[in-house]
Amino acid sequence: MFDLKGKVVAITGAAGGLGRAFALAFAAEGASVAVCDKNLSGAIETAQLIQDAIAIEVDVADEKSSEKMAQLIIEKYGKIDILINNAAIYATIKRKPFYELSEAEWDLVMDVNLKGVWLVSKAVFPYMKDKNYGKIINISSATVMSGSPMWSHYVASKGGVIGFSRSMAKELGDFNINVNVIAPGFTLTDASLSLIENANKYGVDRGAIKRPSSADDIVGTALYLASSASDFVTGQTTVVDGGKQFI
């Protein structure tokens, strides 16, 4: 589909689910893959499925850990062409009204889902700047467009990803670095299946395309945004949800 031979991609949250799907898809297109996750054993499992990959333990909410991640990728591959900020707290979030959330619950979601995007991008940026090239793809959520009751901290964190990405795109254009966002709808991953009963039927009737979404439905957009086909696309948010948001 897209030739990514010679490219190096760093993917956070790649121990499983959508992150693993990204890793496998990018490897299939010829990219070298840095599989980055707080769950090192899961990252190793993903890396073992790929011919040219490295597994790295990272806490995206910690600046030194994010910097070490970037340094290890440079030591291994000498460059970072593509960054996918996919790591997020999702399945473990307890749904409750915003007025019952504790400060600790709010801060934890913001630290990983939004601060983590900032810290990892900040850690990778100097290496992209040195090469005068880069593609940063941040993963948000279609819930930002519709809202989701009892999940306000998650929705707010993913809305922040969109705003931050637009600002970052304006700042990084002079360095030939593109910054874009993918906002997936409900997608059948292990994490999603653990959240909702009858997940295979969830929201299907609300879409223009009346079937559940899989991780494979998301990866094509990521490959496009990582390739030369999107060199004049930046600061954009692509909702991939089978048409639910305009129904």
Image: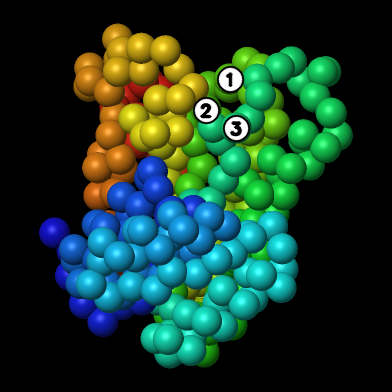
- Of mark 1 and mark 2, the one earlier in the sequence is 2
- Asked whether 135 or 67 is in front, the reply is 67
Q: Which amino acid lies under the numbered mark 3 shown in the image of this protein?
A: Thr
Q: CA distance from mark 1 to mark 2?
A: 6 Å
Kindly report the distance in space between the C-alpha atoms of the residues bearing marks 2 and 3. Answer: 17 Å
Q: Which residue sits furthest front?
A: 41
In the image, is 194 to the left or to the right of 51?
right
Q: Which residue is mark 3?
A: 92
Task: Evaluate if marks 1 and 2 touch, with contact meaning CB atoms under 8 Å apart.
Answer: yes
Q: Percent position (x, y) of residue 41?
A: 46, 58
Residue found at the very far right of the displayed protein: 103
The vertical placement of 29 against 196, above or below, is below
Between 82 and 187, which is closer to the camera in this rendering? 187
Question: On residue 32, which mark appears?
Answer: none
Residue at disc 2, secondary structure: helix
- Disc 2 marks which amino acid? Thr
Q: Which residue is mark 1?
A: 148
